[in-house]
Image: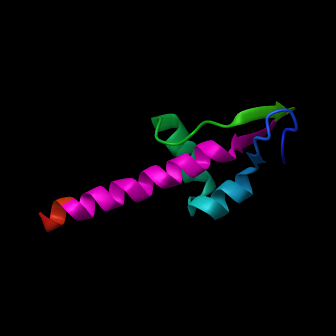
Amino acid sequence: MTTSSTGRRLLRRREVESRTGKSRSAIYEGIRQGTFPAPVPIGGKSVAWLEEEVESWIANCVAARTASRKNLNN
């Protein structure tokens, strides 16, 4: 799903689960803890996540792993 005016892509929950490897409950727990991006309401009871925020979360996880490995090697 893409919004035409900004070119931003919205991801539904199943795609977020697939990209992150997180379960539905883990996604919502991360949102409650402030460690995962919050969804955007898209109408009715439907929500979606901004692709750029999910990709940024993934990049931060990789960066944290890399930093952790560097600390172990020093």
Q: Quadrant of the C terminus?
A: bottom left
- Secondary structure mostly seen in the magenta stretch: helix
Instruction: Residue lying at the far left in this picture: please name it.
Output: 74
In the foreground, 2 or 30: 2
Q: 72 above or below 50?
A: below
Using the rendered view, name the quadrant where residue 71 is placed. bottom left
Q: Position of residue 34 (x, y in %)?
A: 47, 35
9 sits left or right of 72 in the view: right
Assess whether residue 46 is covered by the magenta stretch: yes
Using the rendered view, name the quadrant where residue 70 is placed. bottom left
Using the rendered view, name the quadrant where residue 47 is placed. top right
52 sits left or right of 33 in the view: right
Identified at 56% across, 59% down, the residue is 22
* Total marks in image: 0
Identified at 17% across, 64% down, the residue is 72
Q: Which residues are magenta?
A: 45-70
Q: Position of residue 41 (x, y in %)?
A: 77, 32
Q: Position of residue 36 (x, y in %)?
A: 52, 42
In the foreground, 44 or 7: 7
Identified at 54% across, 47% down, the residue is 56
Instruction: Residue lying at the far bottom in this picture: please name it.
Output: 73
Identified at 15% across, 67% down, the residue is 73
In the foreground, 46 or 40: 40
34 sits left or right of 10 in the view: left
In the foreground, 69 or 43: 69
Q: Position of residue 53 (x, y in %)?
A: 60, 42
Task: Give the colour scheme shown.
Answer: rainbow
Q: 42 above or below 65?
A: above
Assess whether residue 55 is covered by the magenta stretch: yes
